[in-house]
Amino acid sequence: MATLPTRQLTVLFADIAGSTRLYDTFGGSKARDLIAECLSHLKRLIQANDGTFIKTLGDAVMGTLPTPDAAAETARQMHEEIALDSKMIQANIHLRIGFHHGDAICEQQDVFGDAANVGARMVELAKSDQIITNKETLSQMKTDLKQMARIVDRTRVRGMDDIMEIHELVWGQPEQMTMSSSFSEEMIASLTSKKDFLQVRYLQHRILVDHERPIFTMGRGVANHLIIDDPLVSRMHARIELQRNRFMLIDQSTNGTFLKMNAEEPIFLRREAIQLEGEGLIRLGKKIGEDEQIAVRYRIL
């Protein structure tokens, strides 16, 4: 049997992070529409950067780019476009992206080989809002992109003999907080007799969580509704979700979240969820103490 020819390509995978949550939050029909629209954005960006869209894999896309630099630029554009799209923001859609440059076998509009296998492993290692590649691919990238990378792990990849050094490409810059609201508490309370509103305050900003805006995210990353630029705050640190008329605080961070409800003793959460009640304070990565004036405050109305 003849050996199929190989060529050097960068294979990129972009996946919707935690897509099963969309079905729980919005129901099957709307979730499918949101996912399809998101994947359409990703396909277009691959093609706009001289890449080839290969296929859809569930809630992910696979494509090839001619160089690692082109893949990095495509990944950055994907994250930024989804982060700035009002519909994607409302649904709290985030991506995780991985890519690898290496030998690829192109056959019948599909791609096989090391580039595809390792690229698939890179996206598996990525967390929400991350772009993940490896030292081998990074070494072939231009200097300014190398300077945006930081090592995050060393691991063995299936099918590869040596331990692989894993790098994250940092994208985006801290921005001013978005989606703030100037509604007064009286205006909010007059809209409904049910406890359907939660108001978040941070410094001079006020943000609402309700049935129209059921998800509110906090963290250092540019895609969050509330951006807190602090080294102890994770890129995607925590979120508040309205689930079946309950407001849930969900931590997904490295350093954890401190919560003080109704003047009770503070609670520490790490990779946990708790139902919010009444009013209280939330601190990301730091204990609740003397600097309570810069804590995130919430109140169920």
Image: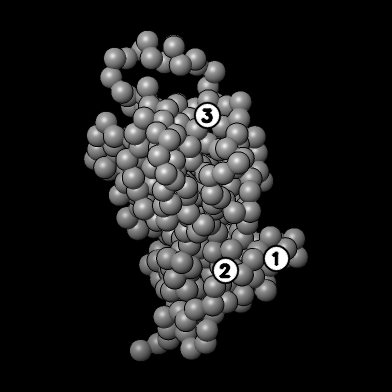
| 47 relative to 198 in the view: left or right | right
Residue at image point 53% right, 22% down: 181
Residue 146, disc: 1
Amino acid bearing label 3: Arg
- Mark 1–mark 3 distance (CA, rounded to whole Å): 38 Å
Look at the numbered discs 1 and 3 and tell me whether their residues touch, using CB distance below 8 Å.
no
Where in the figure is residue 173, as x and y percent of width and height? 66, 46
Q: Nearer the viewer, residue 4 or 289?
A: 289
Could you say whether the residue bearing mark 1 is in a helix, strand or loop? Answer: helix
Residue linked to disc 3:
201
Amino acid bearing label 2: Val
Name above or below for residue 297 compared with residue 174: above
Residue 152, disc: 2
Question: Mark 2 Cα within 10 Å, few/some/many (few <14, many 20+)?
Answer: few
Where in the figure is residue 58, as x and y percent of width and height? 32, 55
Could you say whether the residue bearing mark 3 is in a helix, strand or loop? Answer: strand
Amino acid bearing label 1: Lys
Q: Nearer the viewer, residue 232 or 32?
A: 232
- Sequence-wise, the earlier of marks 1 and 3 is 1
